[in-house]
Amino acid sequence: MFYYLTPINPETRYRYDALGRRVSKATYGRHTGHT
């Protein structure tokens, strides 16, 4: 996804990772229609 935009900072990286997981989860829910 946008992991290539993730900086080396652990804090920012964690934030981006959490956001990515949220978006991924939301997209997955939409595709599966479990929402």
Image (tube, rainbow, N blue to C red):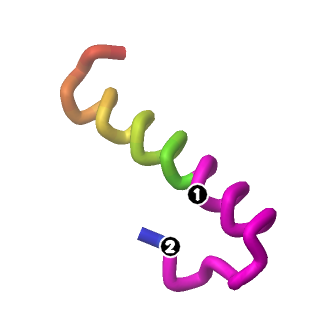
Q: Which of the numbered marks, if any, corresponds to residue 6?
A: none
Nearer-the-camera pick, 24 or 35: 24
Which quadrant of the structure image shows residue 10? bottom right
Q: Position of residue 5 (x, y in %)?
A: 59, 82
Name the residue that disc number 2 marks: 2
Stretch of the chain drawn in magenta: 3-19
Image quadrant occupied by the C terminus = top left
Please determine whether, in this image, residue 21 is positioned above or below residue 3.
Answer: above
Please determine whether, in this image, residue 28 is positioned above or below residue 21.
Answer: above
Question: Which residue ends up furthest to the top in the rendered image?
Answer: 34
In the image, is 22 to the left or to the right of 19? left
Which quadrant of the structure image shows residue 14? bottom right
Image quadrant occupied by the N terminus = bottom left
Q: Residue at x 50, y 74 (%)?
A: 3
Name the residue that disc number 1 marks: 17
Secondary structure type for disc 1: helix
Q: What's under tag 2, amino acid-wise?
A: Phe
Residue 7 within the magenta-colored segment of the rendering: yes
Q: Residue at x 70, y 83 (%)?
A: 8
Between label 1 and label 2, give the one nearer the viewer: 1
Nearer-the-camera pick, 20 or 30: 20
Please determine whether, in this image, residue 5 is positioned above or below residue 14.
Answer: below
Q: Reading the chain from its start, which is encountered first: label 1 or label 2?
A: 2
Question: Which residue ends up furthest to the front in the rendered image?
Answer: 10
Prevalent SS, magenta region: helix
Secondary structure type for disc 2: loop
Please determine whether, in this image, residue 16 is positioned above or below residue 10.
Answer: above
Q: What's under tag 1, amino acid-wise?
A: Asp
Residue 22 within the magenta-colored segment of the rendering: no
Q: Residue at x 27, y 15 (%)?
A: 34
